[in-house]
Amino acid sequence: MEDLMKALIIVAHGSRREASNEEVRQIAHQVAGIAGDEYALVVSGFLELVEPSIPDGIQQCIDAGATEVVVLPYFLSAGRHVVEDVPAEIKLAQDKNPSIRITQAPYLGSAPGIGALLLEQSVSGG
Amino acid sequence: MEDLMKALIIVAHGSRREASNEEVRQIAHQVAGIAGDEYALVVSGFLELVEPSIPDGIQQCIDAGATEVVVLPYFLSAGRHVVEDVPAEIKLAQDKNPSIRITQAPYLGSAPGIGALLLEQSVSGG
């Protein structure tokens, strides 16, 4: 019997400003810390400019034993990156690994809880 | 005695893709629906390309009776827009309205709850 192992990859655009990329890595690290049994592995990946690319990040998860990979776009709106570019990158990894289940989660900006998070954030800092 | 009235303005970059701007307006509307007694008014504003600008959005709040305005950057990283451009826009409004308290809340990406929101989002869609 094969063990199931689920990984999450949080994918951002990638920035020339390294501190922005580091913020994404830190958030992946934060999610890893609270993922409990949901994900054995939580990593970050980038659409442009920064390594690992989305296919490379997915491959790292698979090489580490993941049998299922969830790709979550760390984007605020459903622009071309979310609708076309991320799915195209996922397809590259999927074609290379047909036995692995790779799915795209809805992008961050569409999370039902984002309004509550903004309200909380405004009160904490306002 | 003067009544106190607090307004929240959620500011995004502004996009040539109108659906992205509409997403921001919808999120401001969502926050308004759950703001309870915290904010009498929740609106959106844009740094570039889209009306209202941040100073115009702040002015609309003040014209509607706001005595305090919280400006929350709907951005994921602390780049130039969050660190320089939004504060410069706030200063324009503050200089014009010295008696109004106008503050900038921490940007969305720095919200302590963002990891939990991502985890929840990944499970809902993965």
Image: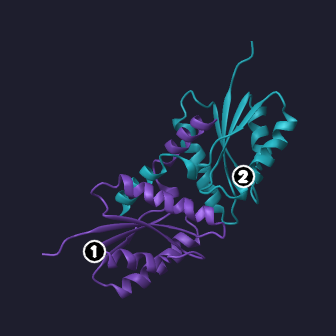
Chain colours: A purple, B cyan
Neighbour tally class for label 2: few under 14, some 14-19, many 20 plus, Cα within 10 Å:
few
* Residue pictured at 77% horizontal, 33% vertical: B62
Residue type marked 1: Thr
* Subunit bearing disc 1: A
Establish if A31 lies above or below B36.
Answer: below
Q: Residue furthest left?
A: A1
* Residue pictured at 68% horizontal, 58% vertical: B79
State which quadrant residue A101 falls in: bottom left
Neighbour tally class for label 1: few under 14, some 14-19, many 20 plus, Cα within 10 Å:
some
Same chain under badges 1 and 2? The reply is: no
Establish if A101 lies above or below B8.
Answer: below
Can residue B66 be spotted in the picture? Answer: no
Residue B102: percent from left, percent from top: 74, 35
The quadrant of the picture occupied by the C terminus of chain A is top right
Residue A7: percent from left, percent from top: 34, 67
Q: Nearer the viewer, residue A108 or B112?
A: B112
State which quadrant residue A96 falls in: bottom left
Residue bearing the label numbered 1? A67
Label 1: element kind: loop
Horizontal placement of B46 versus A20: left or right?
right
* Residue pictured at 31% horizontal, 85% vertical: A98
* Subunit bearing disc 2: B
State which quadrant residue B65 falls in: top right
Residue A108: assigned label: none
Residue type marked 2: Val
Q: CA–CA distance between discs 1 and 2?
A: 41 Å
The quadrant of the picture occupied by the N terminus of chain A is bottom left
Q: Nearer the viewer, residue A22 or B58?
A: A22
Label 2: element kind: helix
Residue bearing the label numbered 2? B83
